[in-house]
Every structure is written in structure tokens, then in C-alpha cells.
Image (spheres, rainbow, N blue to C red):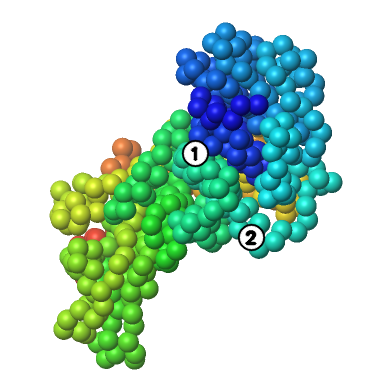
Amino acid sequence: MPRNASGTALLTDNGVDGACAAAMGLLAFPGAEVIVTSARRIGVTLASLQGKTFGAVHVCGVGIYCDWMEVEKAARMLKAEGTALHWHCGRGYLDDRLEELRGVCTPAFMHVGTNTAAVARTLGLESARLTTLAAFDTHLPAATSLKKATPDQTLWLDFIEAALAQYFKFQDSAPYVHAIRCLARGELGEQERRLTEAFRRTGYTHLLYGQSDSLRHLKERIQRCADANRPVIITGESGVGKEHVAHLLWERGPRALGPLIPVNCSLYAGNTALANSDLFGHKKGAFTGANKDRKGKFVEADGGLLFLDELGELPLEVQAKLLRVVEDGKVTPEGADRHEAEVDVGIIAATNQDLVAMVRRGTFRADLYHRLATLRIHVPPLRERTGDIRGIAEQRLKTLEAEGHATKFSERDWRLLKDYDWPGNVRQLIKLVDRAVLLGLTVPEALREERELGEVREARENEALNLLPTERRQVRPLDDVVRQYAHNAWLLHDKNYSATAKTLGIAENTLRYSYLK
């Protein structure tokens, strides 16, 4: 068989065996183009090769889970262009397609445990390193999977998984192709080891599930923002998954091996002293109760990222100090007359508020907004990406099933979930799935409860905020209306008297002893 790498393509799928099979092909054709596909997309992928004048295309174990006519038509077109199509399979799952494939390509089928071993035998190659590693693929039958990997093998397996994760998290297939080339060379550099170590720390914990176009665009946006290594503002309604996005920005970015320090800015509403102490630290004796020095969140996040959740709640007085630290990296603790630390900290912020409107009202600094908002990521509400509902819910069902709970939704259940408007977004969907499974409710019953709870909340809000009665019976004593309004404002501010009083434009004592007594 000729070893001229020019004009050769290697098609493979995701997974350890797929990566090792393509790497084996690269040993024969070092300059070959590696193309990642899947059993669902194999027909479309073959069709995309038309006109590229490949002398040979080797399909490394990819199955067929699409319309056979797509595969047949594309294969015949390639043959007409003079392309030799070889289809390798070493695991038996394409045996029932053998006669069909024989009519359009050269099948290289054998039962040797892995597709990697099949490619090796067909091309007359030997690489115990690749064939042994391929046998660790978790999709192989238990009888052919090895049980214990050496530390070096574990490193390679984790590296392959880390590269694969870049596609599932960010729609980026380039790291997986790069991993295949590293496998062929048998070398891992510092960059590859860093990627592996970052994946070992995070895994798939913050994966965004779904198949919608808007989710695909969101993943691509996250990738671009992370690679840009600049401050990012994440916007979106409550419950859409802004914290997940923040974690993905951290995992993808250059500070992935540093800390990610989350800060809930809503805890600072109306409390400048707490915000200054918590973010920038304080010196012993700076204020009553400051019994020792405190470093603060910025120093804790040195070398990593600071995630400022609910950014719009940050007091104006603190915003100016935050801007200075973002710009020069110099941190001055409360009680100090000069900076005492220089930090390298990336900033990710999130909010469900309209910061532009806040800037116009003077409740958010324009200079801080423009410093942080060069890169923005908007996370769309669930009602705008209903195609993701099933993927999110199915993943939650897998978690519940692993905990020992019986889980099964019918097609009618999926339609009902898709038709609901989900005002609480992903968080509400997960909560509903949990309630249905744990309490043994049907999906219609769980949705009925959700609607009833929503109607009660809406009725209470309407009753509390009905300041313009339209009927005589709706008129209430003015003192009652004021007290109810103040009480609801207090609850919305997490029972923070100072923040509530500031928002209402009254003295804190007036709120405490006149309206909330």
C-alpha cells in the first residue's frame, strides 16, 4: 500500500478508540487530514469531501446511523472522482452493512476488539502503545476492555477526554484533532498537560446540555470570550445558568489552573463597609470588630478569576475602587494608606439587570461599565430555546436514576414540558423534574402544581402592589398599603434594612419602627 500522505483523509469519531485509530492512520499517512464526524453525520461528512481530490479516504470505525442513501450517494460520487474509500471496523457493529458497503468502497472488517487494531492490521502497522490504549475505551464490551491503566496511560486517556470536552463545552473540535496528532507522535507538551490538569479539576460538571442553534452559538461565544482573556459581563434572566457560563469561561481561559472566587454582590447592597472589607481586605483595627488583618477576595483570586455575581447590586462607592483595581491590579485594604498587594486577576461579572439603564439613572458608573463590558455574553431564556428542554431534563433524569430512582417520561410528557413557558428557566425545569421523580408525580401533575404556585405568587404580588384600585372594594387604608409595600421591598432586599431604606429614600429607623414594626 502506498505511503504517500498527500491527498489522504482520515475520518474518525469521538472516543479513545476513535482517536487511537486515526493516530494509527497518521503513522501510515503523516500528512493526512484528520476529520471528526459521527454515525449520524457520516453521510453529510462524506458528501463534503467531494471536489477536494483526495486520493484515498480511510473511515476509521465510524458507524452508520443515518439514511443509507446519503452514504451510498456520497461514496459513489467520491469513487467517480477517483477517490479510493476504505472503511475499517474491528468491533463487528458494521457487519450487517458489509454487503452494502462492499458495493461502494473497500471494507476492511475483522473482529479484533478495537478499530485501532483493525486499522493497524489493514495498513500493516505495529504500535502496541496505541492498540493497548484503545482497549481502555469505555464503550467497548467489558470482555475487551482493560481493567487498570498505568500512570502514563491514564495521562493519555485524560488528555483525550480533555480534548473531547472542548467540543462538548465550546463546539471546538480542533483540540481533539490536535490530540490525535499528539497520540501519533507519542509526545505531550506543557500546553497539553495544562489542558489535562484543568479537565481533571472540573470534568463535565458545568456542561450546557441541549441541541438548539442558540445553545451552539452560546458555546461558541463562550469560547471566543475565554480565548480573548478580557473582562466579560454575562447577562440573562434568573435561572438561565449564568454561573455555569462563568465556570466555562474559567475552564477555557488561561487562568484555569488558578482559583475561581465567586462573590455575591447582592450581599453588599447598602453596605459599603462590608463590600470594601470583603473585596479588598482590611487592616487590624480598621473598624470595630477588625481584630486581625484580612486579605480580601481580590488577593484570594490572584492568578485566577473573580466572579462578581449580581454586579448591579454593588454599591456606587465601591464601584470606583473596583475600577481602580481592575485597571492597575493594586489592592489597598481598608485602614491602609497605600496599596499592599499587586494581583493578576481576571474579572467575570453577571447580572439580570439592565446596566445601561442603570448608567443612565446614575446608579451604576459608566466608566466601570465600559471597562467591563467590552465582551458580553447573553444567555437566552429557556422559552427561546425549547429544543434544549429535553436534553437538560434527560441529563437530570440520568442523575436521579444513578441515585436509584425510577425515571421514565413519555412522548406526551416531553411535549407538555416543551409547551410550558418556564419563567424560572433551567433552574425551574430541574426543580420540576426532581419533584416529579422524588414524589412520584406524573409530569402533568407536576406542571399543574407549578402553575398553581405561579398563580399564587402572581396573585400575592398583584395584591401587594395594587396601588391603582379600579373598584371601590379594592380601596385599602393608605397606611396598610405603605406597610405592605415596605415589607415586600424589605423581603426583596433579603431583609437588609439599610439597603431597603436607601432604595425607598427614607431613614433606616423610619423603616424599622414606622413601617415594619
**Secondary structure beneath label 1:** loop
Residue 411 to residue 309: above or below: above
Q: Is residue 150 left or right of residue 487?
A: right
Identify the mark at residue 100; answer none if there is no mark.
none
The residue shown at (53%, 43%) is: 181
The image shows residue 305 at horizontal and vertical percentages of 37, 62
The image shows residue 232 at horizontal and vertical percentages of 31, 51
Quick one: label 2, few (<14), some, or many (20+) residues within 10 Å?
A: few
Residue 303 to residue 428: above or below: below
Q: Is residue 1 left or right of residue 364?
A: right
Quadrant of the image containing the C terminus: bottom left
The image shows residue 402 at horizontal and vertical percentages of 72, 51
The picture quadrant where one finds residue 403 is: bottom right
The picture quadrant where one finds residue 287 is: bottom left
The residue shown at (69%, 38%) is: 125
**Front one among 10 and 263:** 10
Give the farthest residue toward the top: 80
Q: Which is in the foreground here, disc 2 or disc 1? A: 2
Q: Which residue is mark 2?
A: 152
Quick one: label 1, few (<14), some, or many (20+) residues within 10 Å?
A: some
Q: Which amino acid, mark 1?
A: Ser
The image shows residue 374 at horizontal and vertical percentages of 24, 48
Q: Which residue is mark 1?
A: 173
- First in residue order: circle 2 vs circle 1: 2
Q: Is residue 33 left or right of residue 267?
A: right
